[in-house]
Amino acid sequence: MAVTINDIAVKVGVSHATVSRVLNNSGYVKDETRKKILKVIKDLNYTPSAIARSLSTSKTNTIGVIVPDINNLFFGEIIKGITEIADEHNLNIILCDTDEDKDKELKAINVLKEQRIQGLLITPTFYKNIGKCENLNTLKNLGIPIILIDGHVEYLDFSGVFIDHIKGAYDGTVALIEAGHRKIAIITGDMKSRPAKERLLGYEKALEDNNIPINKEYIFYGDYTYQTAYKITKIILKMDNRPTAIFVSSNTTILGCIKAFYEEKVNIPKDMAIIGFDRVDVLNIIGMDISFINGPSIELGRIGMKMLLENLNSKEPMEIKRETILPELLLKGSEKYIKK
């Protein structure tokens, strides 16, 4: 049976309130009595209940983190960055994965609310109808600091940290152009998401700035899944006026492309060049050198957590703060143009 505060109070011969004052380091307790209580706590191996403490103080030492896909390396590294800073400040984390499902997201928000979290870091799911979205209204009414992690919700006043997706896609497309490509396709992410829209804008701007007409036949709308990317790549490879390169909008999407290339015996970059947004470690492990735009995901987590701490430690409501991080282009050879 677990040891309770009452057990300690009886053994020392003091009141429940006196033991609580020692545990919470609040209020006056005689040094002699404090020492006796601390000795009994140690002897009985008593561990205070975080839940009970939160009920008495209306405050926990816990923050919430909500991401849309924990299996995606990008979000895994964001969590790593958050955890690094949280550990330095003795904060606990409750992590929720929504699978990009708005119903799961709403459930996660409500569960975290019940846990009395101090603050929330979230990459929101995509919303078709912002005005009628219960999730966003629930977030707005939580009454705690909320930081967006690369999930731009333009219609609510949240602070956040974001990647410059336009710049990343622009640089990746320009790298293909500089390698000699003129027929460049793009497989987008889910166009309900801001990152997908911005990456398409970056791709189109790079073509325009280099006097290359935008060919609508080379724009393929994906959904961030490798299954859809696999099907799209199969279509691209059968085109009469086939592109010589593909800009791929996410790390999960590129896996679908690689699978299609393998089945069709397509050599990279001899038969098709490719650049992806965000890295895929497994490709490096098996010796596939794929060029990619590196979104600094760990740094996103660190900065987001620091923003949250700044809000938690402020005695006054803070102004909306939004920070943008520039991605890095890493060329490994898959962008090259091999003349036939």
Image: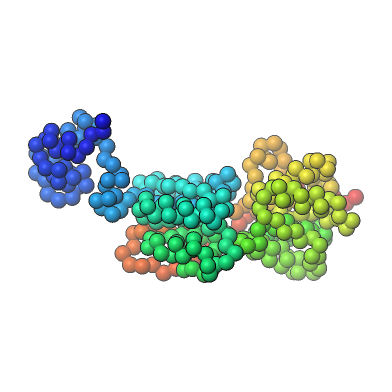
- Residue 107 visible here: yes
Residue 195 pos. (x, y %): 62, 60
Q: Is residue 206 left or right of residue 318?
A: right
Q: Nearer the viewer, residue 159 or 339?
A: 159
Report x, y in % for residue 299.
Answer: 51, 52
What is the number of callouts on the image?
Answer: 0
Residue at 71% of width from left, 37% of height from top?
Answer: 287
Q: Is residue 231 left or right of residue 225?
A: right
- Left or right of 270: which side holds 62? left
Q: Is residue 303 visible?
A: no
Asked where in the image residue 184 lies, by quadrant, the reply is: bottom right
Q: Nearer the viewer, residue 58 or 81?
A: 58
Work out which quarter of the rendered image holds the N terminus and state it.
Answer: top left
Q: How is the image coloured?
A: rainbow
Q: Specify the quadrant of the image occupied by residue 185.
A: bottom right
The residue drawn where x is 83% and y is 43% is 264
Q: Is residue 282 above or below residue 182?
A: above
The x, y position of residue 100, in whole percent, is 57, 53
Name which residue lies at 67% across and 55% down. Answer: 223
Residue 47 lies left or right of residue 291; in this view the side is left
Frontmost residue, 74 versus 13:
13
Q: What residue lies at 24% left-to-right and 51% top-to-bottom? A: 56
Seen in the picture, residue 26 relative to 194 is either above or below; the reply is above
